[in-house]
Amino acid sequence: MKIKEKIRHALPYIQIVPDTFRYQFFSKVLLAILLAVLKQISMLLIRSTGRVAVSSGDLSILYKTWQGPLLIVVAIGTFFLYVAFDLNTQIIFASKVLEEKEIRLSVIFKEGLRSIKSFFTPDGIGIVLYIALIAPIIGFGLSISLTRDFYIPTFITSVIRTTPLYNAIYLFAVVVFLIIGIMNFFTIHGILISGLKSSRADDNSRAIMRKNWKDYLKNQFRFLLYGIAVNALFILALILPFAAAALIFIHNGLVLRFLILFFGMLLSFVLALTNSLLQTFYIVGITRLYYRYMGMDDGFVFRSDRKAGKHFLLRMGFAVLFLLTMSLLFNHYFDVIFSEKISTGIIAHRGGGNEAPENTVEGIETAISLGAYGSEIDIQRTSDGHYIVNHDGNFSRLCSDGRKPEEMTLAEVKTLTIHDPNYPDDPQQVATFEEMLEAAKGKIVLFVELKGNTADRQMVDDAVRIIKEYGMTDECVLISLKYDLIDYAETAYPEMNTAYLTFVSFGNTAALNCDYLGLEDEAATSFAADSVHDLNKKIMVWTPNERERQDYFLKSDVDYIITDNVRQANEILESYQDRSDLEKVVDFVMRLFQ
């Protein structure tokens, strides 16, 4: 494609920038209002059950109370509203642009609302659930902002990756859903633009794809390249003047610090706006493909609105002025804002993490030698009422014995030998709970997870009794994925520290009856940490093992990280000791992009 042709192709998109930002702004405001209302309705239902939140360890509310089905209806209704106002309105906006109609947001939002009724069919419900839940997981297809970051928890994906059968099933499912997503990609376009019923729109989309799949994939790749190119262009446009200014003031630390702050915040602001803009441009582009595949005119010429363009430039000018002011304030109060003091403690996962055989006395000793704040272990009950340490439901993985702890006596368990794949030449005995307490006493805090089929109130009672026998009430924390056990432990034994582990929650999770809240890596946001601290509780994150995730959380407001890679976390902490002001600023700017 010649340069002039490329410019001619791109110019219409540039002309609709003001309308696009106007649409993006008001649609986000509308969605925020809708979400706030739906959240209040959900919270009223949750509170009427006597709870403060719904979480992964307490899902019985969904099937044991009359409010549960209503909560599910509200959740599905939320998906429908988001599809209507976050996706359908974008396609309607694109169609009006392509048909050179007047862009009236009130009309677009009304049409988006009316479009909901088209999805009240079995096919339509499937489409909505696919968009809301499946597309984010496979990383392909039209999606909504509410669930764009939806993910499979890390502890589940780690099991999938390390189990060949599960991994094969997972990959097969991803491929199947990917093919379904591609073949039905234009279903919503058929409903909204061609006025087809959902089942007919499915057939229409599949017919389009069978005929045009090569061109479709080529254009998808082109859209991806355009997105990368636009982002690279803006980065380059800001990096070059920053580099020139930095060279001039290379020996003036105060000015250089300000430049990094200003250009860093400006770049993050520009990229956020650009990606928001590109999202709608992408919808316009694929909608344009739909028109072409349906045999409709492809020679669209968009109209520019000079008045809207001036307003847009004025708003951008105010935004830059605001960022400039914030940079000056940040620079002036630097020592207050960036008074960095790392206080996040490190807890070794499964005894000593990857630094020693799993869930062994040697693991505890290794965690102690590495200066870890705590060590997390998993206890289960044997058939004769003793407590041993093992993570899995049976001993197959580590001891090549398929029996479960509750099927064996303590004497039988003690005949087993642990062969950790990471330490094949270091066989270990399965430890008892008492042996772990002895190894930890006075040296490290023990986070005792109540695990497996025998995790019940008897386990809570027995664990507390044993801990008290060793005089370690202040050196142990009872933790579990089962909220009813933690609620019982906190109520019956208020002198004990308790921690509830959850990977999915909704509501006032911080107010749950526990001393520590343990959140899965992806769920541990700064907002969640603030909510927990506001109630004078502590927050843990499990299990950030990658260097970048450890670095992120060690610099955050969380109290502890549970990790397998203790040495790596220590190395990161050591690297913080002599950081310069400029390194702190660069780190702050980099966090804006995360």
Image (cartoon, rainbow, N blue to C red):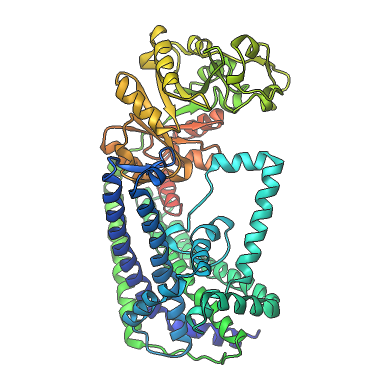
Camera-side residue of 436 and 381: 381
Q: Determine which quarter of the picture holds residue 524.
A: top left
Q: How many marks?
A: 0
Query: Relative to residue 365, is residue 250 depicted above or below?
Result: below
| Above or below for 416 versus 11 | above
Report the residue at 52% width, 90% height from top: 300
Quadrant hosting residue 447: top left
- Camera-side residue of 118 and 301: 118
Q: Give above or below for 552 relative to 473.
A: below
Position of 437 with respect to 27 (left or right) is right
Task: Tell me which corner region of the image, top left, top right, bottom left or bottom right, holds residue 457.
Answer: top left
- Describe residue 250's horizontal placement relative to residue 27 as left or right: right
Q: Is residue 508 above or below residue 475?
A: below
Is residue 420 in sight in this rendering? no
Residue situated in front as seen by the camera: 115 or 421: 115
| Residue placed most toward the observer, 76 or 427 | 76
x then y, percent, for residue 410: 59, 11
On the image, the x and y values in percent for residue 166 come to: 67, 44
User: What residue is at 45 percent from the left and 13 percent from the top?
Assistant: 443
- The residue at the point 67 percent across, 74 percent down is 218
Q: Does the image show residue 171?
A: yes
Residue 328 percent across, percent down from the top left: 29, 55
Q: In the rendered view of the protein, which quadrant contains the N terminus?
A: bottom right
Q: Residue 446, position in %: x, y?
A: 45, 19
